């Protein structure tokens, strides 16, 4: 809405200056600017919802930290490692941590318990591709909640640069395509390594 309001002003040159200043003030936190991808596609939405599978560190290089801290989003933080629980409670007070195997969680239960909307703003899947947890977790979402819930934006880590483990990249693309998602940035790279696919759902995000 903020960007739209800028464009309504009469002086187009001033509009460009204001928009540049606005973007320059934003400090993103994602390793490959995943948070920027989410915010720009959702017009810098406030009070959004996310699910983060493989949350890891609550702040450093975390894709949802800025969403929660600066834009008042709330979400579900999933990680298998218990060492992060206290830091989630300290630094991510607006979100609900689940310390469990992401491929075995009853997502439907938690989404209903936490009153998530059917159109959820962001899904991150960033797990260990080598033990199949990445693909198994996506399949669990597909089997249990993706008929009822949609995600406006998705970043999916397939880590193809490490090897074609369990055909994760192609199998995940089939699932997202089946569910109507649009692959807008395939094989996003970091330090020259292709490791993620980024999607939007055209029912929610205007392309």
Image (spheres, rainbow, N blue to C red):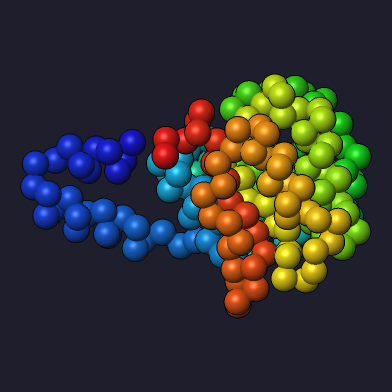
Whether residue 1 sits left or right of residue 143 in the image: it is: left
Q: Nearer the viewer, residue 41 or 192?
A: 192
Residue drawn at x 64%, y 38% as measured from the top left? 177
Q: Is residue 198 above or below residue 120?
A: below
Q: Is residue 175 visible?
A: yes
Side of 132 relative to 47 (left or right): right
Spot occupied by residue 96 in the image (x, y as percentages of width and height):
74, 39
Direction from residue 29 to residue 168 in the image, left or right: right
Image quadrant where one finds the N terminus: top left
- Give the quarter of the image for residue 152: top right
Q: Is residue 4 above or below residue 82?
A: above
Q: Residue at x 72, y 39 (%)?
A: 175
Total marks placed = 0
Corner quadrant of residue 103? top right
Q: Position of residue 21 (x, y in %)?
A: 27, 60
Please identify the quarter of the rendering in which residue 162 is found: bottom right
Is residue 63 toward the left or the right of residue 90 in the image? Answer: left
Above or below, 49 relative to 77: above
Residue closest to the far left: 11
Return the residue nearer the eye: 29 or 92.
29
Q: Is any atom of residue 84 visible in this view?
A: no
Residue appearing at x 60%, y 76% in the figure: 192
Which residue occupies the extreme bottom position in the image? Answer: 191
Q: Residue at x 72, y 29 (%)?
A: 146
Place of residue 43 in the rendered image (x, y in percent of width and height, measured from the top left): 40, 41
Can you say which quadrant of the picture contains the C terminus?
top left
Most foreground residue, 130 or 165: 165
């Amino acid at each position: 809405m903020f960007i739209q309001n800028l464009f309504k002003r009469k002086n187009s040159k001033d509009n460009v200056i204001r928009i540049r200043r606005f973007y320059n003030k934003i400090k993103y936190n994602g390793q490959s600017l995943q948070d920027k991808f989410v915010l720009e596609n959702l017009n810098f939405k406030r009070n959004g919802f996310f699910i983060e599978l493989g949350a890891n560190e609550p702040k450093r290089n975390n894709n949802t930290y800025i969403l929660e801290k600066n834009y008042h989003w709330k979400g579900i933080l999933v990680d298998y490692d218990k060492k992060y629980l206290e830091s989630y409670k300290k630094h991510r007070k607006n979100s609900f941590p689940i310390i469990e195997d992401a491929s075995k969680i009853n997502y439907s239960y938690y989404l209903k318990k936490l009153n998530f909307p059917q159109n959820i703003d962001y899904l991150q899947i960033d797990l260990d591709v080598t033990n199949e947890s990445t693909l198994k977790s996506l399949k669990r979402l597909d089997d249990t909640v993706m008929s009822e819930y949609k995600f406006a934006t998705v970043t999916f880590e397939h880590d193809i640069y490490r090897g074609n483990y369990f055909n994760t990249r192609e199998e995940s693309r089939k699932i997202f395509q089946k569910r109507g998602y649009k692959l807008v940035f395939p094989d996003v790279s970091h330090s020259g390594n292709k490791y993620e696919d980024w999607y939007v759902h055209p029912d929610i995000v205007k392309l």
